Amino acid sequence: MNIFKERSMIHQEIGEMTYSAFEILRSKIYNWTGIYFINEKKYLLEARITKRLIELGNISFESYITQLNNEEFLHIELPKLYTAITINETYFFRCPEHIDTFREIVIPDLIFHKQKSALEQKITIWSAGCSSGEEAYTLAIIIKEEIQHLYPHIEFEIIATDIDEKVLNVARNGLFSEYSVRHVPAIYFSKYFHKEGSSFQLSEDVRSMVRFTTLNLYNQDDWRQLPLLDCIFCCNVLIYFDEQSKKNVIHSFYKQINMLGYLFVGYSESLYGIEHLFARNYELNSLAYKKNELTQFKSSTNIRNLYEVNSTARS
Ligand SMILES: C[S@@+](CC[C@H](N)C(=O)[O-])C[C@H]1O[C@@H](n2cnc3c(N)ncnc32)[C@H](O)[C@@H]1O
């Protein structure tokens, strides 16, 4: 059978996603992940979920929604739904200006303060929403090549997390496409990658520097596995969130980061409305946000409340 005919038959069987089905699904997804599909993105959500409906045997949107109310089904389905709806675009050396700021400003500043204090001589870095790991591995290469020899007594730990388990497996395997490695500087490319078929395998000494684990930024229970952090990279993740869910996550970053720690977000993202928690140093032309030491962030501010208020508002 002609593939187009086959597709349109399947689509007929599944039916269109009605506006009311869209609203129910978007609200559930929002409450689970913080990701918010605006009306203009209905087509995208429909296309992504249709894939799941086909895999589940061409069930309708309505029957999918009914099944999502079943705890047992939900437990098995959620990781697959997350894989279906997330956008995982990433590549090595994606944000060169971030790398420069990290090397020139953030690392020397963090180490200066560590050395002055009795703090553990260790820098802990988190790539939050790491997708298939290119951002975390880029940092690992930079630390290995350009930073570690300057500070031999400092230990560096890199943690990388994502909600999507499928991309984390790609990250752990360390096998990347030509697209993904196209911006790796030649000197590092020849040293740390070797060709395997049409892909490129990252060497074990870089891979062993990063610890990957599943973590949903919108699930407070998941945060318990994290240590206190010195530097967080959360780039091109919160653009899929709405203002409120973004604020909730940034508040959690604030609590999870050391007093003198730094936060990087994507080039097109801003911390508008939350500048009292993190501020940029424009004098140093720094792209990193530094935790605001003067902010009296009351520990009585209950982050969980923020989430609950928010999810009630949306449901
Ligand atoms: C576009 S990629 C960004 C990858 C990388 N940070 C970069 O800048 O190249 C966005 C990633 O955020 C993840 N993500 C989206 N919502 C999330 C959530 N609630 N918790 C954890 N990760 C999430 C997605 O699965 C996806 O892999």
Image (cartoon, grey):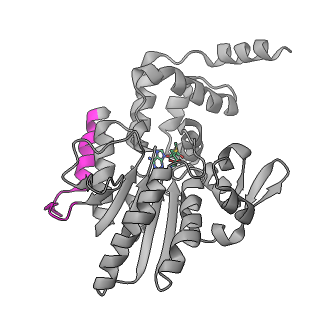
Quarter of the picture containing the C terminus is top left
Residue at the image position 36 percent from the left and 52 percent from the top: 287
Tell me, yes or no, whether the highlighted magenta stretch contains residue 134.
no
Viewer-nearest residue: 223 or 200: 200
Q: Is residue 9 visible?
A: yes
Viewer-nearest residue: 169 or 222: 169
Q: Position of residue 83 (x, y in %)?
A: 59, 42
Viewer-nearest residue: 100 or 280: 100
Q: Is residue 33 above or below residue 282?
A: above
**Left or right for 13, reference 261:** right
Q: Position of residue 37 (x, y in %)?
A: 43, 29
Q: Is residue 211 visible?
A: no
* Quadrant housing residue 299: bottom left
Residue at the image position 58 percent from the left and 47 percent from the top: 76
**Left or right for 30, reference 193:** left
Q: Position of residue 277 (x, y in %)?
A: 22, 55
Tell me, yes or no, whether the highlighted magenta stretch contains residue 307.
yes
Q: Position of residue 68 (x, y in %)?
A: 50, 37
Quarter of the picture containing the N terminus is top right
Residue at the image position 61 percent from the left and 26 percent from the top: 50
Q: How many marks?
A: 0
Q: Which residues are magenta?
A: 292-313
* Quadrant housing residue 108: bottom left
Q: Is residue 16 above or below residue 48?
A: above
Q: Is residue 108 above or below residue 133?
A: below
Q: Is residue 208 above or below residue 117?
A: above
* Quadrant housing residue 118: bottom left
Residue at the image position 26 percent from the left and 34 percent from the top: 313
Viewer-nearest residue: 176 or 12: 176
